[in-house]
Image (cartoon, rainbow, N blue to C red):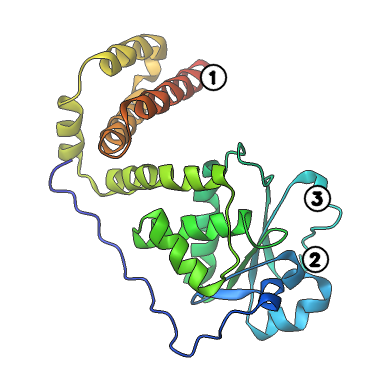
Amino acid sequence: MEDVKLEFPSLPQCKEDAEEWTYPMRREMQEILPGLFLGPYSSAMKSKLPILQKHGITHIICIRQNIEANFIKPNFQQLFRYLVLDIADNPVENIIRFFPMSKEFIDGSLQTGGKVLVHGNAGISRSAAFVIAYIMETFGVKYRDAFAYVQERRFCINPNAGFVHQLQEYEAIYLAKLTIQMMSPLQIERSLSVHSGTTGKNFFFLEEKAGENSIFLKKEKRYIHCLLEVMLKSLNVQKTLLYWSSFSLFIFLKISAL
């Protein structure tokens, strides 16, 4: 992927007059980026409507597991726009699949002058992971730097170990996505031409299965080859093969459904 250089905006600097962290602040929401707030469910309860309106909140991401729905609720659906995500605070929970959706939701709000609150239950693990992922992809920073940035503003954050691992892996994934968006058709073809071996054989097999839908497959092929190239630079071989197996299965299932 030569001649493709990703450029990102700079992270806003921390306010010099930032309030010193105290334990009771964990029950409040904090502004992490201009217009992006992180907090616990207690900051989005019915009694906190005046505070939400004072800060200009227009959108809320509510992260909860279904079994928590009785006490973690979208309380202001007639006033704010909600994105409700069914996610358990469990290390084996797959949260990467929700990152593009949440980023689109946050971007949509900020670009129209809105403000977003992201909350789970305590505002420590799930919601923090999503804010960290947003900062990573938006500003092109590594997990540890995004974590430190968020922690400076909400000191109590502590994503569980499984979420941390996924955030570390997500760097390669979002870089591949952004790179493919910037590549010209010629660069994509050059990228495809340098790959061979097992992955190529797998694609020949899939192309036979695709039949008349080979145009669809070619689009998927371009994306995954570039994705693999980034992963090979960032991850070890075992992880890359695991990703490859998952994507191959994903494409095969999509082709079978055509």
Question: In the rendered image, is residue 36 in sight?
Answer: no
Instruction: Assign the N terminus to one quadrant of the image.
Output: top left
Res. 257 mark: 1
Q: Going from the N terminus, do you reach mark 1 or mark 3 first?
A: 3
Q: Name the residue under label 2.
A: 75
Q: Which amino acid does label 3 sit on?
A: Glu
Q: Going from the N terminus, do you reach mark 2 or mark 3 first?
A: 3
Where is 139 relative to 192, above or below? below
Crowding around mark 3 (Cα neighbors within 10 Å: few <14, some 14 to 19, many 20+) is some
Q: How far apart are marks 1 and 2 (CA)?
A: 39 Å
The answer to whether residue 232 is left or right of residue 161 is left
The answer to whether residue 155 is left or right of residue 240 is right
Who is closer to the viewer here, 187 or 41?
41
Which quadrant holds residue 177?
top left
Q: What residue type is labelled 1?
A: Ala
Where is 4 relative to 38, above or below? above
Where is 236 relative to 54, above or below? above
Q: What residue type is labelled 2?
A: Asn
Res. 68 mark: 3
Who is closer to the viewer here, 249 or 234?
234
